[in-house]
Amino acid sequence: MGELEDAVMTRVWKWNRPVTVREVLEDLQQERSIAYTTVMTVLDNLHQKGWVRREAEGRAYRYEAVSTRAAYAAALMNDAWSQSDNPAAALVAFFGMMSDEQRQALRDAVRIVQGPETPEAPAADTVAETSRENPASAPGGGGR
C-alpha cells in the first residue's frame, strides 16, 4: 500500500464506518493540498485491490474497510516471512528488533492462539528461547 493509500485507509479504519470521498478529502486537506479526484481515485484503487467495499448512495459511494488494520499488518508480516529462505532465522532477527513490550505482546498472542497448554505444545516462552538459542530447532526452522 502506498503512502497516500495508507493515509486514506488510516481514516477509514479510524472512523470504523462507511465514509464518503468528501469526508476523507476534508480530513486530508488539514494536512496537505489534495484534489477531490485524487481521493476518489485512491478509494477506487483500494476498492479494486479489495481493501474497501463500496455502496452507491445517490451519485456517490460510501466506502467501508473490508478488514482491520491489524489484519493488514498481519498480512504484511506473513508475506515478508513467507519470502524468507530461512523462516526461523527471519523470526529470530525480527524478535531481536522488538522492544520488551512487543515481545510480551507476542507471548500473550501466542498463548491466546495456543489456548490451554497441552503436553504436545510447548509454552510460548520455551519456543522463543529455543528459537533464540538455536534457530534450526525452532518450529519451521532449518530452511525449506
Image (tube, rainbow, N blue to C red):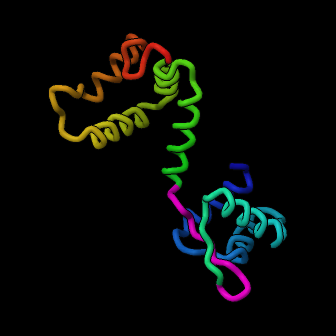
Q: Is residue 141 left or right of residue 7?
A: left
Q: Is residue 31 left or right of residue 116?
A: right
Which residue is pictured at 34% across the width and 41% down the height? Answer: 109
Residue 123 image offset from top left, x and y in percent? 24, 28
Q: Is residue 86 left or right of residue 20?
A: left
Residue 21 image offset from top left, x and y in percent? 71, 74
Q: How many marks?
A: 0
Residue occupying the far front of the picture: 144
Please determine whether, in this image, residue 59 is positioned above or below residue 93: below
Which residue is pictured at 46% across the width and 31% down the height? Answer: 99
In the image, is residue 65 part of the stretch drawn in magenta? yes
Residue 89 image offset from top left, x and y in percent? 50, 18
Which residue is pictured at 52% across the width and 37% down the height? Answer: 78
Q: Looking at the rendering, which quadrant does residue 6 occupy?
A: bottom right
Please determine whether, in this image, residue 4 is positioned above or below residue 128: below
Q: Looking at the rendering, which quadrant does residue 34 occupy?
A: bottom right
Please determine whether, in this image, residue 80 is positioned above or below residue 35: above
Which residue is pictured at 55% across the width and 69% down the height? Answer: 15
In the image, is residue 30 part of the stretch drawn in magenta? no
Residue 4 image offset from top left, x and y in percent? 74, 56
Residue occupying the far bottom of the picture: 58
Start-end of magenta stretch: 57-68
Camera-side residue of 97 and 66 = 66
